[in-house]
């Protein structure tokens, strides 16, 4: 800038002017000094060009200006710059003011706090002094009495027992004495005295002499306040007296959950957070008040502060959920809840619609129904039935896996023209696993090719003996299209429900299960809840899975708002704080705090569980759990095998395992790859899946990993049966007998003379190792097991090929390889077997 102006500038900001500052010294001396403010060189268009001539200089000097900018443009920019600068200055000023204000505020607060502390201390002192004084007086009175008795000559003294106390008061610890006006006066005098002394000291300082006191106080002119001195003395006095007597310690029962935040711990002990943090530091833990401690650490702290520890489990928060059993007289009959299952296209949806429409038209005046995931109908005989609107066993098992056993009766739909199909069998197994009675609806009987008898006989093979075959399972011939047999079906359901004697207590706090839930744009999170016990009312506070809420509104299956919903009634619930999942259980609790606490606990627990996923449920754990649960433990298993023959052999062998204590229960057997549906059933029933010469397909593998379902692969029936036997007797060795080290996919097959067929592969996972065992998988079924003859990378024989690389493999003594086959590479580990 000075270049621009052609001269050096002195002065304060804004313009080229010199400044003078008057310096004051002690004894009234002053001195004027010239201040030169050096200013930064400013380059346009940086703000700070100033308001003065420096910017104008640019304006006037086109050479300093970026090319292509006109004078007018330049002026505009300058103006903008100046405006920005002014703003900045104003902002700085504002900040300064703000700072000053805050400073003052801080000072004021500090002074207030100090004053308060002082007052408190004085009060305490006075109280203590009073107590001491009284004590002493008593003592002295006694002494005086004694003396009076011993020397009657000294009557005068004995007559005034308080008098001799006076001189001693001075000996009492600082200011000791009873809070008489006289004492207060003296104290005030003392204080004045000291203040005077202080003042004098201040004067001395001004005189330039250094006193010992001054030197000790740091010499920086900062002096301890009277309050600080008093505090110090008080501290020392307390220390001398043993400190802890100052207040009676209240021993508290402190509830310590599995984890607790430091500040909350302090709160529960009614101690200061700073003290707790300090004592944690003494233990070598640097934590802040917002960090969590585990229960053990918290316990140490609680003990250190002299309180009593009451350990509570996090899960205890769930205890507020009312789980008291209903007494028999409170129980009232409730409608059954029905799920329709069956093979795809056998008419589940059609049947549900047919039932609903028939009943809505003939009965309720409401007209069009609302889809909320479940609906209720009334049979001609007056029985009310609740149907779940999501057919199929996927929903059924996923609900069961989440802990909601909602269904009372399963209606198995079998198309009369198609008879029993794979999903029919799955549905049968699911119903059996859940221990839910079945009613068979033989559908599509309107079709000319319908053959209901065939359905009945085929069901026999799956241990479903219908009434027509003199069994116990009811069977009804229906047609969703013509409506034939629908009423009969509904009456059968009503009859079955009577046999089940379904009851609930409508008078208690509601519990139920979520059937559907979604986030509605207008209404927020909405869940259809099937009330299972009690009555859900508007205004009820509840927890549902990891969510909680307060019932804002209830909407029934006809779209009407209702004030309450009793047992087996499906209702849409509004007023949730988040969207729960189907199968989540809803419980009404008393307070919002409880609801929130439980929801938070569950969320954390779910997080922990996800974190621990991979720690799959092992056979051992399953068995241990089964034993805990009941006297006769049942080990549920799912078996998938490569051929029907081996599946049967395995099931037969399994059925032989077991004694008075344990029993193996084969939930489902099948032929072919392990599917997602198998994993679903396994999860719901807490069973492992045994694959005999078959593998899980990719979705099933993922599902198993996610849900923590154990899949075990075998290629020798003896091994499989043996493991189950070992698990059943609690002797299963947790060690892995065989583990996969890699997978390779066959891309092409070549014929090489002298060697035979060679598979051109790519290693898709892990490694391929020459020495390892190999299996050939076609469609997830093992078709060969053996060893490798060669493992080649390009032309060379190698020991190992890594994932992502191509290689050539040939099997020892085996030639039937095709492109698309998968080679599984595994290693065996010798495991000590504990069974003989
Ligand atoms: P879902 O997959 O089990 O739910 O079966 P759907 O209800 O979707 O029915 C599959 C097909 O079967 C549809 O084309 C229906 O129209 C037909 N269908 C269902 N019930 C009957 C019936 O009772 N008679 C006849 N003829 N067709 C039916």
Image: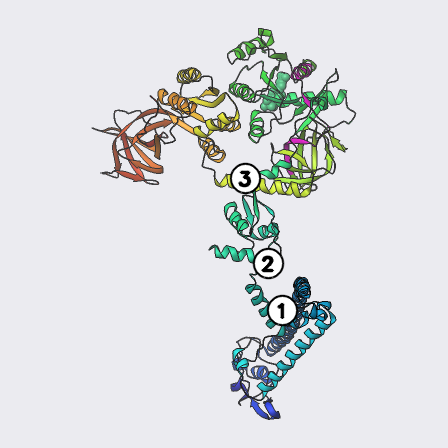
Per the image, is 496 magenta?
yes
Q: Name the spot of residue 281 as percent of width and height, x first.
A: 49, 57
Answer with the quarter of the image where residue 124 lies: bottom right
Report, in whole angstroms, how far the alpha carbon at label 3 lies from the one at label 1.
Answer: 64 Å
Viewer-proximal residue among 413 and 609: 609
Q: In the displayed structure, would residue 279 be above or below residue 666? A: below
Other-residue count near label 3 (Cα within 10 Å), few / some / many at <14 / 14–19 / ≥20: some
Q: Residue furthest left?
A: 754
What kind of colouring is applied to the model shown? rainbow
Looking at the rendered structure, which numbered label has been put on residue 172?
A: 1
Secondary structure type for disc 2: helix
Q: Which residue is mark 3?
A: 606
Q: Magenta stretch?
A: 491-518
Tell me if the residue at label 1 has its CB under 8 Å from ligand 1: no
Q: Nearer the viewer, residue 529 or 124?
A: 124
- On screen, 38 above or below 93? below
Q: Nearer the N terminus, badge 1 or badge 2?
A: 1
Q: Nearer the viewer, mark 1 or mark 2?
A: 1
Q: Locate residue 420, reporting x and y percent.
A: 53, 15
Q: Which residue is mark 2?
A: 245
Indicate which label's residue lies in the foreground, 3 or 1: 1
């Amino acid at each position: 800038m000075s270049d621009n102006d052609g001269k050096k500038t002195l002065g304060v900001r804004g313009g080229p002017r010199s400044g003078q500052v008057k310096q004051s010294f002690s004894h009234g001396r002053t001195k004027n000094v010239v201040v030169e403010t050096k200013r930064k060189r400013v380059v346009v268009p940086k703000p700070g060009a100033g308001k003065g001539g420096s910017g104008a200089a640019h304006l006037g000097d086109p050479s300093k200006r970026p090319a292509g900018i006109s004078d007018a443009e330049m002026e505009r920019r300058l103006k903008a710059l100046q405006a920005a600068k002014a703003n900045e200055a104003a902002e700085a000023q504002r900040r300064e003011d703000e700072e000053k204000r805050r400073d003052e505020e801080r000072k004021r607060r500090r002074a207030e706090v100090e004053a308060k502390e002082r007052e408190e201390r004085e009060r305490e002192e006075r109280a203590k002094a009073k107590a001491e004084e009284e004590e002493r007086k008593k003592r002295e009175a006694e002494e005086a009495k004694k003396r009076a008795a011993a020397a009657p000559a000294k009557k005068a003294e004995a007559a005034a027992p308080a008098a001799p106390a006076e001189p001693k008061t001075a000996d009492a610890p600082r200011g000791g004495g009873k809070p008489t006006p006289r004492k207060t006066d003296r104290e005030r005098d003392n204080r004045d005295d000291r203040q005077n002394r202080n003042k004098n000291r201040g004067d001395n300082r001004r005189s330039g002499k250094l006193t010992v006191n001054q030197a000790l106080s740091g010499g920086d002119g900062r002096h301890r306040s009277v309050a600080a001195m008093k505090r110090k003395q008080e501290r020392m006095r307390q220390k001398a007296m043993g400190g802890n007597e100052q207040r009676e310690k209240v021993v508290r029962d402190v509830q310590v959950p599995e984890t607790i935040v430091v500040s909350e711990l302090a709160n529960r002990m009614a101690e200061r957070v700073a003290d707790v943090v300090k004592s944690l530091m003494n233990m070598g833990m640097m934590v802040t008040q917002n960090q969590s401690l585990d229960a053990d650490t918290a316990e140490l702290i609680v003990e250190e502060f002299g309180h009593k520890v009451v350990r509570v489990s996090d899960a205890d928060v769930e205890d507020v959920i009312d789980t008291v059993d209903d007494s028999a007289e409170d129980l009232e009959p409730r409608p059954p809840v029905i799920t329709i299952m069956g093979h795809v296209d056998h008419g589940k949806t059609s049947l549900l619609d047919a039932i609903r429409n028939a009943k809505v038209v003939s009965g309720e005046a409401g007209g069009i129904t609302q889809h909320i995931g479940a609906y209720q109908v009334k049979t001609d005989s007056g029985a009310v039935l609740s149907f779940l609107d999501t057919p199929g066993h996927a929903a059924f098992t996923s609900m069961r896996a989440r802990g909601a056993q909602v269904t009372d009766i399963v209606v198995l739909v079998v198309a009369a023209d198609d008879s029993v199909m794979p999903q029919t069998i799955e549905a049968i197994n699911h119903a059996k696993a859940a221990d839910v009675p079945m009613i068979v609806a033989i559908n599509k009987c309107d079709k000319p090719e319908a053959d209901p008898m065939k359905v009945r006989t085929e069901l026999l093979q799956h241990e479903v003996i219908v009434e027509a075959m003199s069994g116990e399972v009811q069977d009804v011939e229906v047609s969703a299209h013509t409506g034939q047999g629908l009423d009969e079906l509904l009456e059968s359901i009503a009859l079955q429900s009577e046999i089940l004697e379904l009851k609930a207590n409508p008078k208690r706090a509601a519990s139920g299960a979520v059937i559907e839930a979604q986030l509605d744009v207008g209404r927020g999170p909405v869940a259809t809840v099937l009330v299972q016990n009690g009555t859900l009312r508007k205004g009820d506070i509840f927890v549902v899975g990891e969510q909680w809420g307060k019932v804002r509104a209830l909407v029934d299956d006809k779209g009407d708002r209702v004030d309450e919903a009793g047992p087996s009634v499906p209702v849409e619930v509004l007023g949730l704080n988040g969207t729960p999942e189907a199968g989540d259980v809803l419980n009404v609790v008393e307070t919002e705090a409880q609801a929130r606490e439980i929801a938070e606990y569950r969320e954390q627990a779910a997080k922990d569980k996800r974190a621990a996923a991979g720690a799959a449920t092992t056979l051992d754990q399953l068995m241990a759990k089964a034993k805990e649960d009941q006297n006769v433990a049942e080990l549920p298993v799912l078996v998938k095998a490569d051929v029907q023959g081996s599946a049967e052999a395995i099931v037969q062998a399994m059925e032989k395992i077991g004694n008075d204590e344990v029993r193996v229960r084969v939930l489902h057997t099948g032929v072919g790859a392990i599917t997602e549906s198998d994993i679903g059933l396994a999860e719901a029933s807490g069973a492992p899946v045994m694959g005999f010469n078959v593998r899980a397909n990719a979705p099933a593998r993922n599902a198993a990993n996610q849900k923590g379902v154990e899949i075990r692969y075998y290629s020798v029936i003896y091994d499989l049966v043996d493991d189950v036997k070992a698990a059943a007797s609690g002797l299963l060795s947790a060690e892995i007998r065989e583990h996969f080290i890699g997978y390779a996919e066959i891309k092409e097959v070549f014929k090489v003379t002298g060697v035979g067929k060679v598979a051109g592969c790519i290693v898709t996972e892990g490694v391929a190792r020459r020495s390892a065992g190999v299996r050939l998988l076609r469609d997830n079924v093992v078709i060969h097991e053996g060893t490798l003859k060669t493992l080649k990378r390009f032309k060379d024989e190698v020991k190992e090929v890594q994932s992502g690389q191509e290689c050539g493999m040939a099997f020892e003594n085996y030639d039937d390889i095709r492109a698309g086959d998968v080679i599984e590479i595994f290693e065996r580990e010798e495991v000590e077997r504990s069974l003989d």
